[in-house]
Amino acid sequence: MRNIYVEFPNERPLDKQDVELVERKGIGHPDSICDGLAEGVSRALSQEYVKRFGHILHHNTDQVELVGGRSTPEWGAGEIDTPMYILLSGRATTQVGDDVIPVGEIAIEAARKYLKENFRNIDVDTSVILDQKIGMGSSDLRSVFGRKGIPKANDTSFGVSFAPFSLTEQLTYEVERYMNGTMKKKVKASGEDIKVMGERYKDEIILTICNGMVSKHIKNIGDYKAIIEEMTGLVRDFVAGITDKDVRIEINTGDDIDNQSVFLTVSGTSAEMGDDGSVGRGNRANGLITPYRPMSLEATAGKNPVNHVGKLYNLLSKEIACEIACEGADQVYVRLLSQIGHPIDQPLCADVQVVGPMKLEKRAVEITDYWLENIQEMTEKCLKGKAETF
Amino acid sequence: MRNIYVEFPNERPLDKQDVELVERKGIGHPDSICDGLAEGVSRALSQEYVKRFGHILHHNTDQVELVGGRSTPEWGAGEIDTPMYILLSGRATTQVGDDVIPVGEIAIEAARKYLKENFRNIDVDTSVILDQKIGMGSSDLRSVFGRKGIPKANDTSFGVSFAPFSLTEQLTYEVERYMNGTMKKKVKASGEDIKVMGERYKDEIILTICNGMVSKHIKNIGDYKAIIEEMTGLVRDFVAGITDKDVRIEINTGDDIDNQSVFLTVSGTSAEMGDDGSVGRGNRANGLITPYRPMSLEATAGKNPVNHVGKLYNLLSKEIACEIACEGADQVYVRLLSQIGHPIDQPLCADVQVVGPMKLEKRAVEITDYWLENIQEMTEKCLKGKAETF
Amino acid sequence: MRNIYVEFPNERPLDKQDVELVERKGIGHPDSICDGLAEGVSRALSQEYVKRFGHILHHNTDQVELVGGRSTPEWGAGEIDTPMYILLSGRATTQVGDDVIPVGEIAIEAARKYLKENFRNIDVDTSVILDQKIGMGSSDLRSVFGRKGIPKANDTSFGVSFAPFSLTEQLTYEVERYMNGTMKKKVKASGEDIKVMGERYKDEIILTICNGMVSKHIKNIGDYKAIIEEMTGLVRDFVAGITDKDVRIEINTGDDIDNQSVFLTVSGTSAEMGDDGSVGRGNRANGLITPYRPMSLEATAGKNPVNHVGKLYNLLSKEIACEIACEGADQVYVRLLSQIGHPIDQPLCADVQVVGPMKLEKRAVEITDYWLENIQEMTEKCLKGKAETF
Amino acid sequence: MRNIYVEFPNERPLDKQDVELVERKGIGHPDSICDGLAEGVSRALSQEYVKRFGHILHHNTDQVELVGGRSTPEWGAGEIDTPMYILLSGRATTQVGDDVIPVGEIAIEAARKYLKENFRNIDVDTSVILDQKIGMGSSDLRSVFGRKGIPKANDTSFGVSFAPFSLTEQLTYEVERYMNGTMKKKVKASGEDIKVMGERYKDEIILTICNGMVSKHIKNIGDYKAIIEEMTGLVRDFVAGITDKDVRIEINTGDDIDNQSVFLTVSGTSAEMGDDGSVGRGNRANGLITPYRPMSLEATAGKNPVNHVGKLYNLLSKEIACEIACEGADQVYVRLLSQIGHPIDQPLCADVQVVGPMKLEKRAVEITDYWLENIQEMTEKCLKGKAETF
């Protein structure tokens, strides 16, 4: 009934091939800002629905458009001239009987909170215009949410993931997490807009990093150079903790130091000076963009975690792939395809491709079955903000 | 050169006539909110221009549109369902040479500050969407601001005012100031959206007051009734301090107590539930709407205080009328008409109509001349926030 | 029951006084554009409501904000660089039972139609962004519209008007109508943004006219000068058909011909290059702005013509004043004050001030009573687009 | 210098594997509408830049957000209640010296034109609100466009494609093209919002099609059923012209015919009733979404075709893959990776994976080299609207 297929294609896993390419847009990239806002709004709505009605109601807030502003960064200073404009849209249930749910207010509040918590150099009060056009959901869809039992799939759609990360993927992912994490305490001048591009040709790995630097914390071009060098050293040390291999680290190599044309920002994100963003154009649910791996184009962030298979199947396939990989597979690709109107635990097809020992077949089936059986655990994780969506 | 004309028309002053009618929209009325925001933005820009360039630059921010939201007030509680939407527009100088002035950011910041300082029941972070479309001013107009000497009038326009207030006018004005002032400390349930309509027929004065009440501070309909009665008593006492005459006080008489259909709000203003507002549709610069008195239609709030005669002449005529009235006139009407391109201290016509002793003519001319001579004092008052514009 | 008071104040009518001042903003002035759009939307909605339900439903669309664009006029050419942005807002009934009224679509359609019919040089498809945020009306107000009999006043408000026009007023009004009417056929280069300021000092009348000229129809500065002269001649001839008096005509005297800094536009309105507009800041319901006459600040355009006394009483007082003036009064001032919740034919006070023979008292009462009795005729006129509102 | 690598991985081509999954969002899907608008705006700007300056200037208009409206479809009728709202954003060069380019107007005009030409059931005048917030591009980027020679890459980014289409892919693609092409003439009731999901398990191919039907052309539920059956027959015949294999065709199988809950629209697209859309979330540059194939996440539509490698490399890799496939390869994957600041004909890496005879290596290198050498042909194709981007 769950239509689980396990294949063992005769392929070399990606890390045995010659070329690899992977990208991670850090949390301050305009696309990631939109993903974060979309998911934050969905989570806040879900929590409010649960509080009021005992279960999540229909919504999909996976539509956020960020229109970049204008700014004038200066050494040791800088100003936002035109605020960035953020439009929250999508659908949500605004009324149940006579009970009106303040969707607009919840969305704005959640968005402000997300920005405040994640972007220490953005003054949310004055540098951001938060607008919202969240409409009412269609009534048919709304009705299905109250029912008992496993929800029905909202659409014919698919989720895709893989495991494990290759070394290049791991480095690409971890380095952004490090730079936007513990490194931030040491280097105040590093903004949140960090893009890491990992490339491998045979044994040679290069991490090309673009980091929007925060002008008020940098005195002059000399200071800028010194900070970039400091960061390069820190990242090199961090990478050395993960691998013995020689990894080239290049930070802001597009800079033209002589002409002082460098990646300088007021707020730590290029959204302040003209870079636009939207949901679903950045990282996949596993945190990476992987042109050498299968991907789903469904935006995971912002969709309702009850019956939107575009969200749930992306998250679920990640869990399934990871667990099978833990059992000893070299490479696992998982693709889940839903059937509109059918219970979400019964996909049209759950396709698992394993590069590894054939004996894994049974475990692969068990793991896949377990997660489909318990798909509503994923809904809970989303509700609690424990599911990574970008 | 200042074309000052003083007339002594053979009229009964308004308070000797049979009928009088006057209105004041309190600071929480949607139109007044817009006036306050427009002036707040203009003041913040003016101060920034002075800080950077030593003088105010061209701007006119007398365009604010408030689109009402939706709300669900409830006894002892209540929620904003859809935030009100406020669009700041107008023109301002955004650049001088290479120096970019962060007009958008200054405007948003000033607007937030104004709302926070004046509306204790509005959560600016979540109940208001503040948007801005402030454009660049035309370059010709911008150039005149840097010049030495008396600025040239920006337009052919006029300012109008009168003095003194009749008793009905005084009561209408003072009662709103009292209710939104010292009374607020005693009656937490009184919102800022207060409209006072003063009517007099012969000796009978009625003050009809609409006050948006704040739901979270009112337990039930009985409590509501009690609070309205308390307020009626307080206003009656306040009025008794001004006049011995019998004045009828009617607060929220449009309420249908039996059906619990009363003027209840979450935030203290009807803007939360569908009442829109814009600049220039409420009080004149003297704080009143007076269909029995001459009025100017020029919005005073938000215009630049350097050469916009629509602002300066309204403010100036108020000062002139008041001073002449102090000299012993029963009624003074002042109308100032500018000539585009001429220095603002040289109106095409300064028309003063006095009901009172003919001997006042000389003082009337002197006072009018003084204020035209010192018109730039008014610019200073605006800059310091000491000019009342609505 | 209709509380009609007729007074005969001992005043000189305005045209016997020394100074007069009057202004008319032509249909292409940004404020008038907004008035026209607001009324057009209200009319379209009213007609649709009547078609569907047999009577007009609750709405007030007296909120339009126009944010000026940017343009580059050139001799014989010119372009709109940034479209003007027009936000239609206000309230309307969007649903009755299961019947959804396409308010947004009706509003946009009506707005487009109004712009297309009145502005031959505006390309509505590309030079204008028409947005709408028309909300749902409050349910209480909506319910009163279906009832039989005379509607109840929506608010405590007043309407004000006067008659007859003085010569200065007549000229101010008629000259704009002429220039935007039959003169347009002869002078293609004259845009719709025409402001006429009429001033009289004793016997001297000056009409100061600002007219946005259309660049594509003007070859060069010489051509411009010639066209202004032609227009001046045409207006002089037109005025000569109305009065024998000497009237000075000044068109675009703010121009700096030597520096080619003249009032040139692409579309015939200054809205294209930064002049903003809103409803209710321009002409009163009689088509004029009259600081020497009593005025109401209520915007007439866009309000519902069923129970909004801010609209109906302004229109009604104009009719009443005109008819009484026709009976031989030198000057008539009419002020109607409503009582919230009372039938609109029963004002709290209908105050008529007549300068003229005392014998007019009876006719004044009859005429006022007639119009109150038949106030719903005014609703019909609005519905058919026969009521002038600005 | 062009870093071309050709690999021959030991893989089964996709059509020899057990499972395949592919999707195409038709031109009326909200995401595709946004893609089409983005590309239309970019093309119009490019053409205008060429006309004025001889070459394309900097712009990226790959940001369009569509917020769905509300509608009431009815048998034989139907209305749009709330227009859909479309926000065009991105960046473009608005000024060169004194020459102002009317970017806003060009964008709105291009968007209207695109909608009019492609959606016969959308009334662009009244059912769509077209807004724009296209900002000014950053000056550094703008300067590079005027230079002679091969442009430098704007970013470190990649393009990905493959060839040939498998049968399932071909059917998925062709069926939408047929349904939105010649079938439209026979079946007026078929709207433009068509989503085709192609699934293959071993030899069994299913095409699941969702088609928004146009209510005014359908009399009742019986008529609806008959039209769906007619369409199913037509598609079956069309497919029979491509393959002998048995292909299951399912159109609107999510319908609940008994309860008349079917996919009915007024305008032929679900954007009218709440489905939002944005650029880059639908088809890749080859017209498909292929979770079993490598994909790039870069939105192709709307980017500048001069130096945006996110656009050019996606288009180029498609050409390269197709030509190599024509030489006899079973499967070709092409990935091009740029180096920021380097000429776009010199990628960091051009990785070609061929499943097929090893002798193709030389041709693969030649073809790849040729297309890199002639990358500016692709710019020309975009300019002429001959490059398919979604």
Image (spheres, coloured by chain):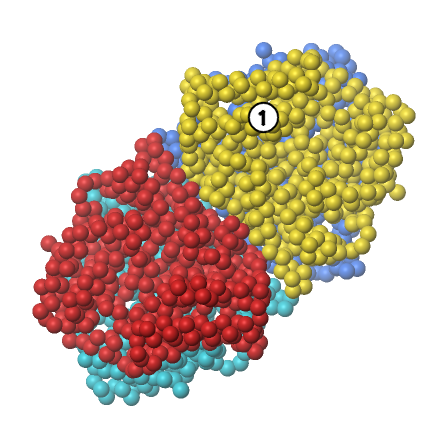
Chain colours: A red, B yellow, C blue, D cyan
Q: Residue at x 68, y 49 (%)?
A: B46
Q: Local crowd at mark 1 within 10 Å, few (<14), some, or many (≥20)? A: some
Where the C terminus of chain D falls, by quadrant?
A: bottom left
The foreground one among D121 and B318 is B318
Please say whether residue A296 is visible from this viewpoint.
yes
Residue C259 to residue D73: above or below: below
The foreground one among C160 and A37 is A37
Quadrant in the rendering for residue A238: bottom left
Quadrant in the rendering for residue A97: top left
Residue A334 to residue C28: above or below: below
Residue D368 to residue A368: above or below: below
Which kind of residue does numbered mark 1 sit on? Met
Provide the residue designation for mark 1: B183
Please say whether residue C236 is visible from this viewpoint.
no
Q: Position of residue A179 (x, y in %)?
A: 40, 66
Q: Position of residue C380 (x, y in %)?
A: 53, 26
Q: Position of residue C198 (x, y in %)?
A: 77, 38
